[in-house]
Structures are given as structure tokens and as C-alpha cells.
Image (tube, rainbow, N blue to C red):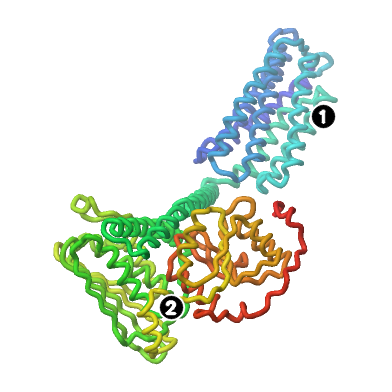
């Protein structure tokens, strides 16, 4: 080999070695996170150091001993290094393409998955190169290897480059933006170097091209991703993982709500129906116990769902007109039922000056009072539980409602008062080991009161009892009460009396249909049933008309949402339709309204809420509402019923 060519090649490779040593020093001296990308890049730097070193040693041997067999060994080692380098780069690209901005767990999984496969490929090709012939040329001042071994290596490297190009084209939309340019640059650099080396083998450009690729990756990816910026990405990734976990939690709560509420609907419906049949003796007590136990279970489910709404910032106050007298009667009836066999005096009083009609969230007000009363009954074994409701008229438009719940129960220690409204907190667990509950009630109560811009205060003496006072303002819609309305409400438990209006219940669960029939029978309505969305569509398109439809959502084949969507798109459907569902998650009520439903009723069916809906969509005492008075035209079907499955 000529001295000029030797010095030129040696100088060229020495510069490459100096650059890669400098880059290695900078990279390994910096603080780094333990990520898959950093691991792969570390391997690339070490491999590049090794490859350039082998190149320099080969030049040295060629200059001093052109016939040394060590040249063939070094040439084969260098070709094995080339394949290893291409495999590691391919591994890095695969992780970028198929993991993208996914979680660390997925990247680790892909790294382990591809690492094993590529390691096996590297061993196979290394054995092939070690076996097949290879020649080393130093004649005419040129230094390069040739023969079957070199050609095999070039073919393998070309195969990997083609793989890079194909993947980059097919998966271009899935590659993160900050990784796309480096990937294309490395692919282009490697392609040019491979072509030049193949046609002009005496030009030793491969090692230099590899060093350039390493620098491109460092400058465009790993230098930009310093620990601080990378930490921001880790925070984003943690947020994404938290969102995925929250989505999984939401799906679980949705399934839990549906699976628990559906049988609860049957248990409560049938047991309440039995109580209305004037059972006597132990049978009546058993039915009451079933109702009370079911109410307790339903309260726990509702508390968990409401806490979920709080955590996702979806718990909202939904205001409307209501009568506080109805809330008071419900609280009295509910508390008397919760007392069970306890020998407690239940004292209750409601001020006479509460306006006839208020504007606010009656459901949440009821929930606040129920939580406080349930808590008092739960922790009071002897003595009394007292409910007192006062009202202060502020002006003609506003009033202040004051709800106080007092008991002679176990009381609360001073050191526990600060933790009283924390989630999942239970006090005196040893003393109250038999007391049921999740510890969510008071935490939820405080949140609801604050959402209503109210206040909640507690005064308690350990061993003597507690007193909770909730205060909030409400808008006045109507001040004076009408005596005749009071008389009607006093003489009957029904807040709605129909006049044979026709109602259709659509549910795939036959038990739920029986429960709905049992609950709706006292209201003087004509009740029909349908077991699926398709059956309901057939009934309607065949000319059947209804004054109200209660439609379950979670049904096979066609959900309630899909059924309603089909009817509204293909017919002149205008019947008031209620979403009757066990799905009571945060935001579902609003979602059902967006999907075209006119109202929402969750299972188990609450009679008071049911009566509100009946009064809203059907006029009581047999007078149809304005919508029902309109003559319903014959439905015009624009779609084929057999094609519904495509929805």
C-alpha cells in the first residue's frame, strides 16, 4: 500500500475516531434519564467507537505487513460490526415508529421484543460472514475487502436500508415530528455511503458516514432532549398514562354501575311493590329490610360515582323549579325507614314560611340532607335524631334555607374534626366496627354545599352527640302556598295521576320490564313493552303510537341511542323519549340529551323522579300535554329496517 494513501486513510479515520470519542465523552458525562432511546443510542456510540478503531488497526497492518492473515480477520470483524450497527439502528427506528409517543411500558415491551429477534439475526449473519470467503486488497495503494463475504454484507445492509425506507413511507403519519427528520437524514446518509462504498470500494466512507449519522441523531434528538425538556415529556407521558388510567376507571365504573344497578332495580322495585300490598308480620319486616339494604347499597354506588364526578370536575349543579315540601316529606319517610329496629326518637320540623316554589337543585339538596341524616342514624344507637328546616326571607327574590341535623350519638373527637370531611376517613374504627359505609358521605356533602355557594358547620362533643348545620340561598319563584294543592298531596302518595296515556317501555331485560310495570301500574296508564330496539322500530313504523317512550340504552344489536337516531333520521318521530338506563356516570345525563333524548331516568327507578318526568311530559289528571295533543302523522320510513345493523 502506498504511503500517501495510507496516511490519507489513517488521517481520515483518525478524525472520525476523535469526533466519536468527543461525542461519547459529552453524551456519557451528561445526566440522563434511563430511557430506551438513551440505551440504544449508547450502544450505537460504543459500536461506532469499535468500528472506527478496527478501521484504523486495519490500515496500520496493511501498511506494515500487507500479507498478514490478521487483515482478513480484521476485515471480517469489521463486516460483522457493520451488520450489528445496521441492526441497532433498525431497532431504534422500529421503537420510534411503532411506539411513537406511547407509554414507557410499551417502549420497553417493543425493545425486548425486537432486541431478541435482531440479536438472533446478528448471530446468524455473523456466522455466515465468518464462514464464507473474504479477500483483502492492498495492491495499487488501495485498501478494501472484496469477495462473497463483502457482497453478503453489502446485501444485508442494503436490505436494512430498504426496510427503513419502506417503514418511513408506510408509517410516516405515526412517526413523532421530532424524530421524522433524523430518521430520514440517517437513512439518506447510510444509503449514499453504501452506494459509494459498493462502486468505489477503495474510498473508506462507511465509518465516517456512521459517525455523521451518530452526530445527526445527537444534534436533532438527544441534544434537544436535555434532562429538563425530557422531564417535561415525562410529565406529559405521565399525564397521558393518568388519562388512560382515568379512562379505564371510567369504563370500569360504567360497567359496575350498570351491573349493580340493574339487579338493584329489580330488588327495589319488587320489594317496594310487596310493601304496597299491605304485607303483615315478618313478611312486611323482611320486605322493609330488603328495601333498606338495597337503599344502602344504592347510596354507596351513588357516592362512588359522585366522587368520580368530583375527581373529573364533572359534578355540576342543575337548577330548576321545585317544592321544598316534597323534599321534606321524602326526608321524613326515608329516615323513618332507616331507623329500622333502633329505639330512636325521630324529631322533625319544617318552617311554615318556606316559599311554595323555589329555584335550585332539588336533587342535590335532597342528597345533602340524606347524607347527614343517614350519618346520624348510623352513629346513634340510643336517644334521638332531629331534623330541623328553617327559612329566612332575604327579599322578594331570595331566601336562605337552613338545614340542621342533630343527634345524641357517639360524637366526634376534637382532633378528628379537621379530617371529618376527608374522603374514605372513618373514626373510632374499633368502636364502630359494625358500622357500614365508605367514608364518602360527608366529603361529598361538603363538596355539594360548596358548589351551591353554601356553608356547612359542625358542633360535636365526643360521647354526647353532633349537630350539622347547612346554609345556602335559593331563588324564590312563588311565595304563597295553595291550600288545595297541599290537600291533594296529603291525601295520596302519588304525585301524578294519568288518564290511560299510552307508554312504551323498551328493555331487553324481562325482569326490568316487570319492575317497570309494577312501578307504573298505580299511575293509571296503559303500558306496553318491547324487548329490543328493532322491535320498537317495527312497532312504530307499523302505525303504533305512544304518548311516552322509556328506552333502555344498553341493549344488544341496537342500543337505545342507535334506535333513537335511526327513528329520527328515517321517520318523523316526535314522541317524548326518556333514557331509562343503569348508566349513571358523570356526564351521561348531558350526553343522552345531546343524543336526542328528552329526559333521563337512572335505574333503580326513583318514584319521585319518575313522577317529575311524568308530570313534565304528560299532564296529570288525564289531560295530555301540548305535544301529545297534536295529531301524530303516519310515520314515513326512508330506510330499510333490515339494514339497521350497519348503525
Q: Place residue 389 in its image quadrant.
A: bottom left
Q: Place residue 277 in its image quadrant.
A: bottom left
Question: Is residue 235 at all visible to an observer of this figure?
Answer: no
Instruction: Say if 52 sits above or below 176 in the image.
Output: above
Q: Which residue is mark 1?
A: 195
Instruction: Say if 80 sits above or below 603 in the image.
Output: above
| Residue 609 percent coordinates (x, y) | 45, 70
Q: How many numbered badges does the structure rendering display? A: 2
Q: Nearer the viewer, residue 257 or 332?
A: 332
Mark pair 2, 1: CA separation: 77 Å
Residue 250 left/right relative to 637: left
Q: Which residue lies at the image location 69% right of the left edge and 61% below the top edge?
A: 566
Label 2 packing within 10 angstroms: few (<14), some (14-19), many (20+): some
Residue 513 left/right relative to 8: left
The kind of secondary structure element at disc 1 is helix
Q: Which residue is mark 2?
A: 360
| Residue 367 percent coordinates (x, y) | 37, 68
Q: Which residue lies at the image location 22% right of the left edge and 70% below the top edge?
A: 346
Residue 40 left/right relative to 644: left
Q: Place residue 407 in its image quadrant.
A: bottom left
| Residue 108 percent coordinates (x, y) | 55, 35
Which one is earlier in the sequence, the residue at label 2 or at label 1? 1
Amino acid at each position: 500500500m502506498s504511503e500517501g494513501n495510507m496516511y490519507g486513510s489513517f488521517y481520515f479515520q483518525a478524525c472520525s475516531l476523535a469526533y466519536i470519542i468527543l461525542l461519547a465523552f459529552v453524551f456519557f458525562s451528561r445526566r440522563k434519564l434511563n430511557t430506551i432511546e438513551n440505551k440504544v443510542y449508547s450502544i450505537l456510540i460504543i459500536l461506532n467507537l469499535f468500528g472506527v478503531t478496527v478501521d484504523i488497526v486495519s490500515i496500520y497492518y496493511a501498511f506494515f505487513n500487507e500479507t498478514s492473515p490478521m487483515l482478513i480477520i480484521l476485515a471480517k470483524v469489521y463486516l460483522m460490526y457493520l451488520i450489528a450497527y445496521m441492526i441497532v439502528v433498525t431497532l431504534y427506528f422500529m421503537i420510534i415508529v411503532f411506539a411513537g409517543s406511547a407509554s414507557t411500558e410499551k417502549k420497553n415491551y417493543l425493545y425486548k421484543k425486537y432486541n431478541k429477534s435482531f440479536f438472533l439475526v446478528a448471530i446468524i449473519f455473523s456466522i455466515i460472514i465468518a464462514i464464507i470467503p473474504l479477500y483483502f486488497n492492498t495492491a495499487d495503494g488501495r485498501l478494501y475487502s472484496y469477495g462473497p463475504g463483502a457482497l453478503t454484507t453489502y446485501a444485508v445492509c442494503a436490505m436494512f436500508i430498504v426496510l427503513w425506507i419502506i417503514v418511513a413511507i408506510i408509517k410516516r403519519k405515526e412517526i413523532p415530528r421530532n424524530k421524522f427528520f433524523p430518521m430520514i437524514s440517517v437513512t439518506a446518509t447510510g444509503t449514499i455511503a453504501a452506494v459509494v462504498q459498493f462502486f468505489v470500494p477503495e474510498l473508506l466512507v462507511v465509518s465516517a458516514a456512521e459517525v455523521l449519522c451518530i452526530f445527526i441523531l445527537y444534534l436533532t434528538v438527544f441534544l434537544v432532549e436535555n434532562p429538563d425538556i425530557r422531564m417535561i415529556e415525562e410529565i406529559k407521558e405521565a399525564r397521558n398514562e393518568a388519562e388512560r388510567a382515568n379512562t379505564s376507571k371510567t369504563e370500569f365504573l360504567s360497567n359496575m354501575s350498570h351491573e349493580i344497578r340493574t339487579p338493584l332495580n329489580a330488588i327495589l322495585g319488587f320489594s317496594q311493590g310487596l310493601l304496597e300490598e299491605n304485607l303483615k308480620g315478618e313478611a312486611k319486616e323482611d320486605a322493609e329490610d330488603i328495601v333498606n339494604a338495597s337503599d344502602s347499597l344504592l347510596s354507596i354506588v351513588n357516592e362512588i360515582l359522585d366522587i368520580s364526578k368530583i375527581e373529573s370536575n364533572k359534578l355540576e349543579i342543575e337548577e330548576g323549579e321545585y317544592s321544598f315540601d316534597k323534599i321534606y316529606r321524602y326526608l321524613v319517610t326515608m329516615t323513618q325507614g332507616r331507623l329500622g329496629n333502633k329505639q330512636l326518637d325521630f324529631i322533625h320540623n319544617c318552617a311554615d314560611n318556606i316559599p311554595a316554589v323555589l329555584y335550585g337543585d332539588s336533587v342535590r339538596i335532597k342528597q345533602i340532607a340524606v347524607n347527614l341524616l343517614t350519618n346520624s342514624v348510623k352513629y346513634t344507637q340510643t336517644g334521638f335524631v332531629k331534623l330541623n328546616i328553617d327559612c329566612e326571607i332575604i327579599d322578594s327574590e331570595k331566601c336562605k334555607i337552613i338545614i340542621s341535623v342533630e343527634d345524641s350519638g357517639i360524637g366526634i373527637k376534637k382532633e378528628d374534626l379537621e379530617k371529618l370531611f376527608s374522603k374514605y376517613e372513618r373514626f373510632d374504627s374499633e368502636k364502630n366496627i359494625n358500622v357500614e359505609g365508605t367514608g364518602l358521605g360527608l366529603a361529598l356533602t361538603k363538596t355539594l354545599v360548596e358548589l351551591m355557594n353554601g356553608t356547612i358547620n359542625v358542633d360535636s362533643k365526643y360521647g354526647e352527640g353532633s349537630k350539622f348545620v347547612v346554609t345556602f340561598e335559593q331563588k324564590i319563584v312563588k311565595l304563597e302556598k295553595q291550600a288545595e294543592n297541599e290537600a291533594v298531596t296529603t291525601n295520596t302518595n302519588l304525585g301524578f295521576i294519568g288518564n290511560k296515556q299510552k307508554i312504551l317501555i323498551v328493555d331487553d331485560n324481562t325482569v326490568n320490564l316487570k319492575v317497570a310495570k309494577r312501578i307504573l301500574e298505580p299511575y293509571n296508564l296503559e303500558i306496553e313493552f318491547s324487548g329490543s330496539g328493532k322491535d320498537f322500530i317495527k312497532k312504530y313504523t307499523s302505525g303504533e303510537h305512544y304518548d311516552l317512550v322509556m328506552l333502555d340504552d344498553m341493549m344488544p344489536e341496537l342500543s337505545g341511542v342507535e334506535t333513537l337516531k335511526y327513528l329520527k333520521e328515517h321517520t318523523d318521530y316526535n314522541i317524548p323519549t326518556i333514557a331509562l338506563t343503569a348508566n349513571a356516570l358523570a356526564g351521561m345525563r348531558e350526553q343522552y340529551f345531546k343524543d336526542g333524548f328528552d329526559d333521563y331516568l337512572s335505574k333503580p327507578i326513583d318514584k319521585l323522579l319518575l313522577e317529575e318526568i311524568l308530570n313534565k311530559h304528560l299532564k296529570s289528571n288525564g289531560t295530555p300535554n301540548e305535544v301529545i295533543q297534536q295529531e301524530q302523522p303516519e310515520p314515513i320510513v326512508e330506510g330499510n329496517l333490515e339494514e339497521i345493523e350497519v348503525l
